[in-house]
Amino acid sequence: MRLECDAILFDLDGVLVDSSVCVERNWREWAEAHGLDPETIINVAHGQRTIDTMRRFAPHLDVEEQARRFAEKEATDTDGVYLIPGALALLELLSREAWAVVTSGGTRLAHARLRHVGLPIPSVLVTADDVERGKPAPDPYLVAARRMELEPAACVVVEDSPPGISSARAAGMRVIGLVTTHSREDLVASDVVVDKLESLRLSVRPQGQPRLVIETA
């Protein structure tokens, strides 16, 4: 499959950064502290804003305060945070105007994880702090397209979770599903599903805008 676009919008965790160990450890600690089942929460937390997960499982708590404390703790925890293979090589092919990061984490957390794994901070970074409605709502990806001064149809999204895929789809964007935190079966709403970032082959126009060629094994 060949997808042509003017910009690539990357989710962060599970796409550019492998933070599963860190994410699951923090959710497990929080769940156990509040008498909740960790596995149930972990199974749905990937790809969603912290506050939305807390609202779902602990509406009896002051979720805004809980989310604030959780974010502060996560932003200083880089144990178990690694670079996804192929991420740096892929970004180095693109001009700064041709890619963005759209994450369900907060701005401080996104900066911490990008710096920890040695990835550049993008010129357009959309986080949970920038929207009233997080993924699976289309808002995060629509904000990114607006900041890049592009139509949604000119963007291709790389996502690893069903909420992220739903968000991109609702925004009118094409989606590449990456098998990291979820199974292939969970990513079937994508235009194409790949097992690794190295499966993406880019040829770049002179102005640095990407033409994606996706090879699937």
Image: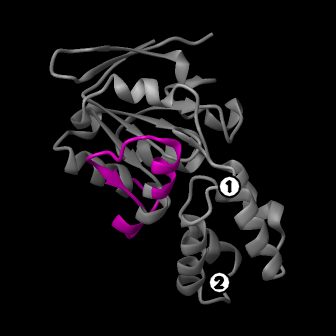
Identity of the residue drawn at 21% across and 50% down:
146
Q: Which mark is residue 79?
A: 1
Q: Nearer the viewer, mark 1 or mark 2?
A: 1
Q: Could you tell me which secondary element the residue under label 2 belongs to?
A: loop
Q: Position of residue 204 (x, y in %)?
A: 27, 15
Q: Could you tell me which secondary element the residue under label 1 belongs to?
A: loop
| Residue under pointer 2 | 59
Q: Position of residue 24 (x, y in %)?
A: 73, 58
Q: Residues within 10 Å of mark 2 (few under 14, many from 20)?
A: few
Q: In the image, is residue 150 part of the stretch drawn in magenta?
A: no
Q: Residues within 10 Å of mark 1 (few under 14, many from 20)?
A: few
Identity of the residue drawn at 24% across and 28% down:
6
Tell me the distance, in whole angstroms, between the alpha carbons under discs 1 and 2.
29 Å
Residue 145 versus residue 130 in the image, above or below: above
Identity of the residue drawn at 20% across and 44% down:
148
Q: Position of residue 55 (x, y in %)?
A: 61, 77
- When asked about the image quadrant of residue 72, the answer is bottom right
On-image quarter of the C terminus: top right
Residue 215 versus residue 52 in the image, above or below: above
Magenta stretch? 112-138
Q: Which mark is residue 48?
A: none
Residue 159 is left or right of residue 31, and the answer is: left
Q: In the image, is residue 116 part of the stretch drawn in magenta?
A: yes
Residue 205 showing in the rendered view: yes
Residue 26 is left or right of residue 196, and the answer is: right
Sequence-first tag of 1 and 2: 2
Q: Position of residue 181 (x, y in %)?
A: 68, 42
Which of these two is toward me, 48 or 99?
Answer: 99
What's the residue type where badge 2 is placed?
Pro
Residue 208 is left or right of residue 117, and the answer is: left
- When asked about the image quadrant of residue 33, the answer is bottom right
What's the residue type where badge 1 is placed?
Asp
